[in-house]
């Protein structure tokens, strides 16, 4: 593909949920065409060849076609050679789809002082890798030159089906959360719960993929405290849809803590800002999982907010979780003194 505009459009669409965007978004973010008619004329041969495809919706949408393939970065090494390590980290955190991110959010992610942040941001502004934007506290976004720092996804690192992510997530939950419970001599249990019965009784989004249960006995409380944590995991491409956040949030009906777990192609790939913001708004925890070493590694991006599920819903969930393991059920009931 020799047309640099096509390269930049594919990079832009690759970072969008469902790999699609409206004509208005494309023209505004990339600034490569003077008007809609010019863009429509330009895209026609790429639509005919299957590199791009057209969708419905108000104003119409454009998405990646089946013939589209990853594009290697065309950025010369000299574009980044003069940047400090911190400036490069800032650039990595700026969305690769051309959308904006606030200065305050960027600075807090890296723990920089105001003076430090403005100094390192200038390193990116001067060579034209980013541009300033508006909003509370100001914002920045990548320019066309900044978009050329895009690194193609390593799709070989991604799973074929969602269920392949359940076992490594379960292992992490047992190791990460269970270790603390064991040190305190408290009860804990984790299981894959995506296939449990009861969906027809509780409606849509009623079964977390993995569930963790802990019972903590406090010296000055009359009864043990039960705490349930749910995990909804989504493979790479599906995770870009905001519906993933709402599904994870729905589990707060019967869990005290709810997480969305997002598959990433590498440790350097960042979660879409719209997903992170919505998780933060709804109190949903956010985990990123990716292949590393001999297995998977996990990074917690957001801690979940503590919820107070309805007792009847919580009881239903616990009954369902332990319905497949009678021995574990008796152990749990002993801990809660039933």
Image (spheres, rainbow, N blue to C red):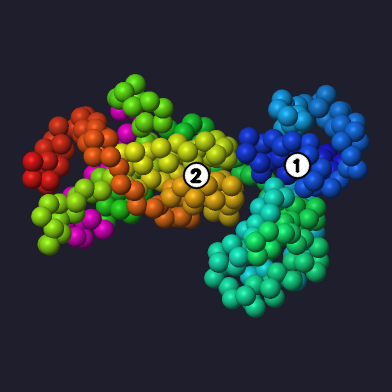
Position of residue 4 measured from the top left corner of the image (x, y, whole percent): 85, 45
Q: Are marks 2 and 1 in contact (CB under 8 Å)?
A: no
**Is residue 211 something one can see in this rendering?**
no
The residue range painted magenta reads 180-196
Frontmost residue, 65 versus 73: 65
Asked where in the image residue 181 lies, by quadrant, the reply is bottom left
Position of residue 159 measured from the top left corner of the image (x, y, whole percent): 51, 36
Q: Which residue lies under the disc numbered 2?
A: 262
Q: Quadrant of the N terminus?
A: top right
Q: Is residue 13 left or right of residue 204?
A: right
Position of residue 206 measured from the top left corner of the image (x, y, whole percent): 37, 31
Residue at point 68% right, 59% down?
135
Q: Is residue 117 left or right of residue 326?
A: right
Please tell me whether mark 1 sits on a helix, a strand or a loop: helix
Q: Quadrant of the C terminus?
A: top left
Q: Is residue 321 left or right of residue 332?
A: right
Please tell me whether mark 2 sits on a helix, a strand or a loop: strand
Q: Which residue lies under the disc numbered 1?
A: 25
Q: Calculate the distance from the C-alpha at mark 2 to the C-alpha at mark 1.
A: 25 Å
Q: Is residue 194 magenta?
A: yes
Frontmost residue, 165 versus 90: 90
Position of residue 254 measured from the top left corner of the image (x, y, whole percent): 31, 39
Residue at point 69% right, 50% down?
99
2 vs 1, front mark: 1
Sequence-earlier tag: 2 or 1 = 1
Q: Is residue 212 magenta?
A: no
**Is residue 48 something one can see in this rendering?**
yes
């Amino acid at each position: 593909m020799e047309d640099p505009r096509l390269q930049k459009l594919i990079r832009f669409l690759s970072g969008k949920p469902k790999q699609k965007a409206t004509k208005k978004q494309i023209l505004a973010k990339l600034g490569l065409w003077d008007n809609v008619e010019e863009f429509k004329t330009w895209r026609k041969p790429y639509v005919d060849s299957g590199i791009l495809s057209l969708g419905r919706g108000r104003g119409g949408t454009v998405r990646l076609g089946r013939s589209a393939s990853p594009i290697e970065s065309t950025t010369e090494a000299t574009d980044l050679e003069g940047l400090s390590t911190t400036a490069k980290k800032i650039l990595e955190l700026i969305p690769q789809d051309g959308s904006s991110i606030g200065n305050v959010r960027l600075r807090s992610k890296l723990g920089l002082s105001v003076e430090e942040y403005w100094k390192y941001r200038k390193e990116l502004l001067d060579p034209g890798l980013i541009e300033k934007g508006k909003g509370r506290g100001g914002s920045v976004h990548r320019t066309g030159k900044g978009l050329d720092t895009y690194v193609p996804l390593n799709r070989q690192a991604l799973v074929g089906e969602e269920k392949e992510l359940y076992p490594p997530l379960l292992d992490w939950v047992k190791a990460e959360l269970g270790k603390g419970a064991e040190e305190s001599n408290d009860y804990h249990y984790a299981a894959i719960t995506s296939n449990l019965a009861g969906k027809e009784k509780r409606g849509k989004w009623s079964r977390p993929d993995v569930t963790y249960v802990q019972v903590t006995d406090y010296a000055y409380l009359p009864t043990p405290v039960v705490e349930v944590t749910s995990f909804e995991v989504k493979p790479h491409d599906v995770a870009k849809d905001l519906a993933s956040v709402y599904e994870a949030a729905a589990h707060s009906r019967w869990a005290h803590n709810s997480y969305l777990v997002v598959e990433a192609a590498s440790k350097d790939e960042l979660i879409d800002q719209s997903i992170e913001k919505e998780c933060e708004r709804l109190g949903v925890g956010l985990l990123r999982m990716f292949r590393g070493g001999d297995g998977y590694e996990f990074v917690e991006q957001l801690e979940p907010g503590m919820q107070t599920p309805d007792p009847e819903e919580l009881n239903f969930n616990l009954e369902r979780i332990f319905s497949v393991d009678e021995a574990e059920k008796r152990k749990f009931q002993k801990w809660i003194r039933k």
